[in-house]
Image (cartoon, helix red, strand yellow):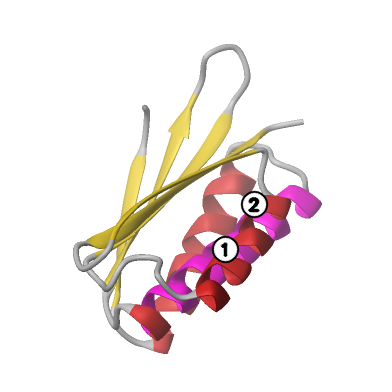
Amino acid sequence: MGQEIAVSIVTDVDIVTARQRGRALAAGLGFSLMDATLIAAAISELARNILQYARRGQIVLATAGGGRTKIVVVASDEGPGVVDRSRTMALSRVRKLMDEFEISSVPGRGTTVTTTLQKR
């Protein structure tokens, strides 16, 4: 991966910061306004999920290549893991926004969600 930006998620203000950094990264890489908005929406959902269920965590934004430019968003926390059905429903919205979606969760040890959007 290329450039990385990490944002600790502890308060609602951090959600705004993470969204802004994601939107700025997308704009700097030449992503369309529509795709920058999708990235910001996914970041917002993931960060809100962290606050609601784990109370703290981190969003890492990274660039990746491999032929076409991609933005990778990794949301991680050390919360209860995905045991609540409503949490998986919120994450399904992120799945619909992004090109790739992967979740790793261990009850009582936390969750990591990795999503990717490719530049069109």
Which amino acid, mark 1? Leu
- Res 44 seen here: no
- First to last magenta residue range: 33-51
Q: Is the magenta stretch mostly helix, strand or loop?
A: helix
Please indicate whether residue 118 sits to the left or right of residue 73 in the image. right
Give yes or no for contact between labels 1 and 2 (Cβ–Cβ under 8 Å): yes
Magenta segment includes 83? no
- Res 105 seen here: yes
Q: Quadrant of the N terminus?
A: top left
Magenta segment includes 39? yes
Residue drawn at point x = 47 percent, y = 60 percent: 21
Q: Where is residue 31 in the image (x, y as percent from the top left)?
A: 70, 41
Q: Quickly name the residue at label 1.
A: 91
Q: What element carries label 2?
A: helix
Residue drawn at point x = 53 percent, y = 39 percent: 71
- The answer to whether 13 is drawn above or below residue 17 in the figure is below
Q: How crowded is mark 1: few (under 14 residues within 10 Å), some or many (20 or more)?
A: some
Residue closer to the observer: 98 or 110 = 110
Q: Position of residue 52 (x, y in %)?
A: 41, 85
Which amino acid, mark 2? Arg
Q: Quickly name the residue at label 2.
A: 95
Q: In which quarter of the image is the C terminus?
A: top right
Q: Where is residue 63 in the image (x, y as percent from the top left)?
A: 46, 34
Residue drawn at point x = 40 percent, y = 70 percent: 83
Question: Which quadrant of the view contains residue 9?
Answer: bottom left
Please indicate whether residue 97 sits to the left or right of residue 113 in the image. right
- The answer to whether 94 is drawn above or below residue 65 in the figure is below
